[in-house]
Image: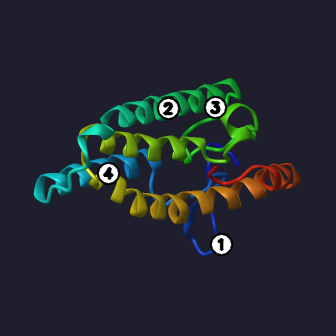
């Protein structure tokens, strides 16, 4: 295709090409979940025991570390984190040896850690809709795309590494 990543279909609908066509960008889902949990806590506080805050800090650190490691591996493979852009490599090393979606696991750890550290149950409760949107609006689409893009190589990777943990 000359000059861009879009192709015109026969029915004149412009369709994005060579990317997963996610419904919403994952950082936006994370931000919405975080804002929703803060608003819900403000409107209807559901406190957690204060003794959980050290665990929250540890969970936050693990989430930040996992997120940072995932970004490192994307950069190392010279492929984009942006699901609106084509993948140039299938990453199977580092945190991708344990999960096919380590950055989404990191987002969940961050929400859980924030909840425990700040003593609010809401960020933990918001994990359910967060992962629903991530699964159906992002992961399922990414997996279909990766199967088309990388074929048997992705199939073999998918067979040996769990989706989440």
Label number found at residue 74: 3
Q: Which residue is mark 2?
A: 62
Answer with left or right where residue 62 lies relative to residue 85. left
Q: CA distance from mark 3 to mark 4?
A: 27 Å
Residue located 33% across and 46% down the image: 31
Residue lying at 43% horizontally and 31% vertically, measured from the top left? 58
| Front residue of this view, candidates 159 and 52 | 52
Of tags 3 and 4, the one toward the viewer is 4
Residue for badge 4: 123
Q: How is the image coloured?
A: rainbow
Of the image marks 2 and 1, the number of the one nearer the N terminus:
1
| Badge 3 or badge 2: first in the primary sequence | 2
Q: Is residue 157 left or right of residue 9?
A: right
Q: Is residue 84 above or below residue 23?
A: above
Q: Earlier in the sequence, mark 4 or mark 1?
A: 1
**Looking at the image, is mark 3 or mark 1 earlier in the sequence?**
1
Quadrant for residue 59, please give it. top left
Which secondary structure, mark 2?
helix
Q: Position of residue 164 (x, y in %)?
A: 62, 52
Per the model, the C-alpha gap separating discs 2 and 1 is: 48 Å
Q: Toward the viewer: 124 or 10?
A: 124
Disc 3 residue crowd, few under 14, some 14–19, many 20+, Cα 10 Å: some
Residue displayed at 72% across by 53% down? 146
**Closest to the observer, 69 or 84:** 69
Mark nearer the viewer, 2 or 1: 2
Question: Residue 151 shows which numbered tag?
Answer: none
Residue 7 is at least partly visible in this image: no
SS at mark 3 in the image: helix
| Badge 3 or badge 4: first in the primary sequence | 3
């Amino acid at each position: 295709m000359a000059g861009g990543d879009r192709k015109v279909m026969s029915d004149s609908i412009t369709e994005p090409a060579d990317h997963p066509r996610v419904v919403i960008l994952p950082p936006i889902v994370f931000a919405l979940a975080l804002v929703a949990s803060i608003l819900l806590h403000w409107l209807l506080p559901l406190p957690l025991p204060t003794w959980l805050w050290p665990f929250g800090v540890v969970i936050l650190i693990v989430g930040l570390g996992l997120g940072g490691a995932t970004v490192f591996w994307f950069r190392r493979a010279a492929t984009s984190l942006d699901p609106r852009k084509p993948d140039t490599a299938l990453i199977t090393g580092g945190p991708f040896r344990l999960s096919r979606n380590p950055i989404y696991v990191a987002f969940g750890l961050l929400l859980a850690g924030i909840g425990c550290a700040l003593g609010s149950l809401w960020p933990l409760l918001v994990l359910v809709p967060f992962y629903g949107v991530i699964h159906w609006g992002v992961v399922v689409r990414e997996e279909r795309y990766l199967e088309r893009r990388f074929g048997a190589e992705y199939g073999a990777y998918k067979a040996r590494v769990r989706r989440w943990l």
